[in-house]
Image (cartoon, rainbow, N blue to C red):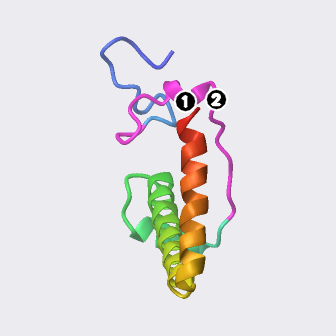
Amino acid sequence: MLGDAGGSPEGRNPIWSASHPRPWVYCGYMKDTTVKVSMETRDRIRALGGATHEDTIIEALDALEAERFWSQAESAKLWFDNLSPEEQRRVRAEDAAVDGAFRGL
């Protein structure tokens, strides 16, 4: 157990932190792992100032995924814009057919 009722488990539980005040919620299915990084990388993570290293890494991954998403979306728009009007109509018709199939589910 993580301590007496009403008491803070901080200091008694190594995975308790202010950003994750109820770590026992995850204990049954989330396993910790060790990721080896250089000291320079560790220092860069620390310098970004997240509540925990994990919080900082998650924020960085979210930003990277968003950047990649928008880059792919912009590439797809450029591809579509360079199609002939007839090819654009064909693509729109195919999209409409797929949308219609999913509406029936």
- Circle 1: residue type: Tyr
Q: Residues within 10 Å of mark 2 (few under 14, many from 20)?
A: few
Left or right of 15 on screen, residue 87: right
* Alpha-carbon span between mark 1 and mark 2: 6 Å
Which label sits on residue 26? Answer: 1
Residue shown at 54%/49% (left/top)? Answer: 99
Q: Is residue 75 visible?
A: no
Residue 75: x percent and y percent? 54, 80
Is disc 1 placed on a helix, strand or loop? helix
Is disc 2 placed on a helix, strand or loop? loop
Magenta stretch: includes residue 23: yes
Left or right of 27 on screen, residue 16: left
Q: Residues within 10 Å of mark 1 (few under 14, many from 20)?
A: few
Q: Is residue 97 visible?
A: yes
Query: Residue 91, relative to residue 22: is it above or below?
Result: below
Magenta region's main secondary structure? loop
46 or 22: nearer the viewer = 22
Q: Quadrant of residue 39?
A: bottom right
Q: Quadrant of the C terminus?
A: top right
Numbered label tally: 2
Residue 62: x percent and y percent? 48, 60
Residue 14: x percent and y percent? 51, 36
- Circle 2: residue type: Tyr
Labelled pair 1, 2 in contact (Cβ < 8 Å): yes
Magenta stretch: includes residue 20: yes
Residue 54: x percent and y percent? 50, 53
Residue denoted by label 2: 29
